[in-house]
Image: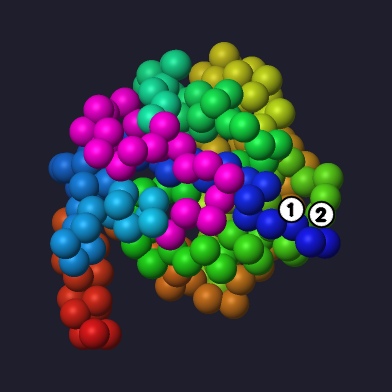
């Protein structure tokens, strides 16, 4: 197909409330860098990297920071605002709490998907889909606006409503997301053991 990551804008989602974690997950550390720094570095091959965040603390990343135009709408609100700022026809959306993410995932999604898909979402070997590690067509703005207008903030409902291509992956580890202090501690221990 000849699709390139330069055809995609990367949107790093750093706007979550982190209620279970108790602190901003984008500021958790991998070695001496924050999750946000590490993931921004991994996303360098894209047309542009946008940070979806309502927090000015991420200015040091020197990326375009997009605040939610409709606060309190969860990931859908961040995706809506970021897609408006998107300079490409498609964007890759990534949660900031996925420290094992590899750019190979996006390359696989982008290459192995149908050309007319509006959403390209991975399904890991444990059967879970990952809407915050997925490709979205920028023209979905009106669909997302409509869904938010109905106060339906579930990502899965957007996926079910659109032309979605699900791409299966034979592993689950790279889709690990950190939601609690216990999960972060477990991740840190596993990282130390693998070094």
Q: Are marks 2 and 1 in contact (CB under 8 Å)?
A: yes
Res 9 visible: yes
Whether 89 is among the magenta residues is: no
Res 135 visible: no
Secondary element at tag 2: loop
Task: Tell me which residue sits at (69%, 57%) in the image.
Answer: 4
- The picture places residue 155, in percent across and down from the top left corner, at 55, 38
Task: Tell me which residue sits at (21%, 33%) in the image.
Answer: 57
Closer mark to the observer between disc 2 and disc 1: 2
- The picture places residue 158, in percent across and down from the top left corner, at 63, 35
Q: Is residue 10 left or right of residue 97?
A: right
Instruction: Between residue 191 and residue 22, name the one nearer to us.
Output: 191
Q: Badge 1, how many Cα within 10 Å: few under 14, some, many 20+?
A: many
Residue ID for mark 1: 165
Residue ID for mark 2: 114
Instruction: Between residue 188 and residue 183, name the one nearer to us.
Output: 188
Q: Of label 2 and label 1, which has the lower sequence position?
A: 2
Q: Quadrant of the C terminus?
A: bottom left
Whether 47 is among the magenta residues is: yes
Instruction: Between residue 112 and residue 150, name the one nearer to us.
Output: 112
Identify whether 98 is placed above or below 158: below
Identify whether 172 is placed above or below 150: below
The magenta segment: 42-64
């Amino acid at each position: 197909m000849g699709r390139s990551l330069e055809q995609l804008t990367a949107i790093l989602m750093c706007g979550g409330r982190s209620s279970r974690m108790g602190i901003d997950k984008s500021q958790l550390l991998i070695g001496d860098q924050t999750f946000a720094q590490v993931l921004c570095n991994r996303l360098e091959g894209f047309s542009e990297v946008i940070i979806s965040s309502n927090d000015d603390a991420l200015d040091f990343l020197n990326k375009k920071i997009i605040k939610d135009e409709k606060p309190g709408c969860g990931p859908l609100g961040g995706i809506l605002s970021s897609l408006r700022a998107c300079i490409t026809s498609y964007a890759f959306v990534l949660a900031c709490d996925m420290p094992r993410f590899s750019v190979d995932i996006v390359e696989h999604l982008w290459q192995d998907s149908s050309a007319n898909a509006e959403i390209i979402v991975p399904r890991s070997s444990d059967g879970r889909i990952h809407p915050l590690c997925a490709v979205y067509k920028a023209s979905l703005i009106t669909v997302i606006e409509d869904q938010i207008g109905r106060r339906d903030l579930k990502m899965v409902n957007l996926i079910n409503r659109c032309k979605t291509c699900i791409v299966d992956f034979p592993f689950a580890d790279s889709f690990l997301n950190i939601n609690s202090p216990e999960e972060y501690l477990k991740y840190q221990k596993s990282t130390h053991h693998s070094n």
